[in-house]
Amino acid sequence: MACLAPCPGYTEDQAAEVTRFRARLLELSTTVSAHPFWQSVEAGDRVEARMALKHAHERAEGEA
């Protein structure tokens, strides 16, 4: 399992970068999940729609 805090052995710069990445990931995740678009998707279909979005890059790579 990955460390929640920067793992032992990281330099200060690496630990700071991990912290920045995690903060950015949280920011982007919140932006996507709270986007007004999701109000246009039926409540019962939202999980399936979000999973399709999560895997959209796999379809795009297969078509390329």
Image (cartoon, helix red, strand yellow):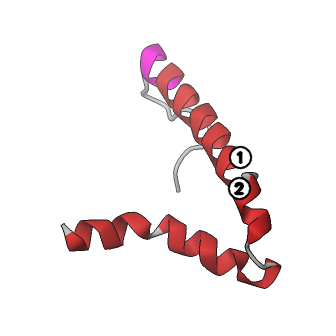
The furthest residue to the top: 12
Q: Are marks 1 and 2 in contact (CB under 8 Å)?
A: yes
Q: Residue 20's quadrant in the figure?
A: top right
Question: Does the magenta segment cover residue 16?
Answer: no
Question: Above or below — where is 31 with respect to 60?
Answer: above
Callout 1 secondary element: helix
- Where does label 1 land, which residue? 30
The furthest residue to the left: 64
Range shown magenta: 11-15
> Which residue: 52% across, 33% down?
21
Front residue of 38/19: it is: 38
Using the numbered discs, state the Cα–Cα distance from disc 1 to disc 2 in whole angstroms.
5 Å
The furthest residue to the bottom: 44
- Where does label 2 land, which residue? 33
- Characterize the magenta stretch by its predominant secondary structure: helix
Which amino acid, mark 1? Thr
Instruction: Provide residue 26's location: percent of width, then percent of height.
Output: 65, 41
Question: Does the magenta segment cover residue 13?
Answer: yes
Instruction: Provide residue 4's location: percent of width, then percent of height.
Output: 62, 42
Badge 2: residue crowd in 10 Å (few <14, some 14–19, many ≥20): few
Q: Residue 57's quadrant in the figure?
A: bottom left
Which amino acid, mark 2? Ser
Callout 2 secondary element: helix
> Which residue: 81% across, 78% down?
43
Front residue of 20/31: it is: 31
Tell me the quadrant of the picture where the C terminus can be found.
bottom left
Question: Above or below — where is 15 with respect to 47?
Answer: above
Question: Above or below — where is 1 with respect to 18?
Answer: below
Question: Above or below — where is 62 with respect to 21?
Answer: below
